[in-house]
Image (cartoon, rainbow, N blue to C red):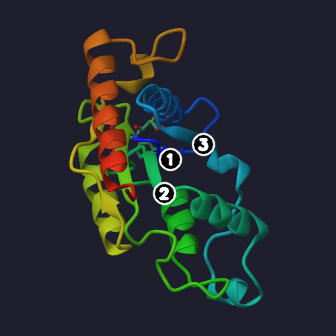
Amino acid sequence: MSHTPRILAFAGSTRRDSANKKLARAAAHAAVAAHASVTWIDLRDYPLPLFDADLEVQGLPPAMLRLRALFAQHEALIVASPEYNGFFPPVLKNALDWLSRPALGQERHAVFAGRPVLLLSAVAGRSGGTAGLQQLRQQFLNLKALPYGRQFVLPLAADAFDARNRVGDPARRAELADTVAGFALSLHALAPA
Ligand SMILES: Cc1cc2nc3c(=O)[nH]c(=O)nc-3n(C[C@H](O)[C@H](O)[C@H](O)COP(=O)(O)O)c2cc1C
């Protein structure tokens, strides 16, 4: 058990007061409590142009090179995503599309293949974002990643966090912690002996 899994956590929203940023951060705290090492990033700090193959042949955007390096340093992902009209948002799709491209001598999907991913969602509506997560789960499967079986969804997100940006409802907070702990434990189990 000396291996400490390294997890990269981020939200599929760049909005300053994003509920999903709060959720990704809350999950990051829970993962640290479950003996993982977590790097939390804000996609706002990695501005990417809309994917365009003509841009790609000119070279990967600097933000993409930084993101790829971060992915290489972490073995698992926690992704908290809003739902936009039943799908995950374009800012996340765009980042995943850029990341899916072969670069620096790597194979296509190199940054995703075999990588465990915990999926979370916070939305304004009552669904919690299950439709968007279904699409996101399929997206990660297409990228050869390993979406974790359990996920966590948070409905009515505008009022779901307390003053400390924790999930306000203690039962839901415990559910998030339990889901994240299960994910972290599965990473320990995957670790080389
Ligand atoms: C284009 C768009 C589409 C949306 N579609 C949905 C939806 O399908 N279901 C839902 O519950 N909320 C929907 N919302 C509301 C979001 O859930 C809400 O804005 C949420 O706070 C966004 O996540 P964020 O706080 O992390 O930015 C939508 C918002 C936008 C801007």
Q: Give how far apart the Cα atoms at labels 1 and 3 are.
A: 6 Å
The residue under the point 43% across, 27% down is 30
Against 88, is 33 above or below?
above
Are circles 2 and 1 on residues that touch, CB within 8 Å?
yes
Q: Quadrant of ligand 1?
A: top left
Are circles 1 and 3 on residues that touch, CB within 8 Å?
yes
Counting residues from the N terminus, which is met first, the one under dot 3 or under dot 2? 3
Is the distance from the Cβ of mark 1 to the nearest ligand 1 atom less than 8 Å? Answer: no
Identified by mark 2, the residue type is Glu
Q: Which residue matches tag 1?
A: 7
Return the x and y of residue 13 as percentages of the image width and height. 54, 45
Q: Which residue matches tag 3?
A: 39
The residue under the point 37% across, 35% down is 123
Identified by mark 1, the residue type is Ile
User: Is disc 3 surrounded by few (<14), some (14 to 19) or many (20+) residues within 10 Å?
Assistant: some
The residue under the point 28% across, 37% down is 182
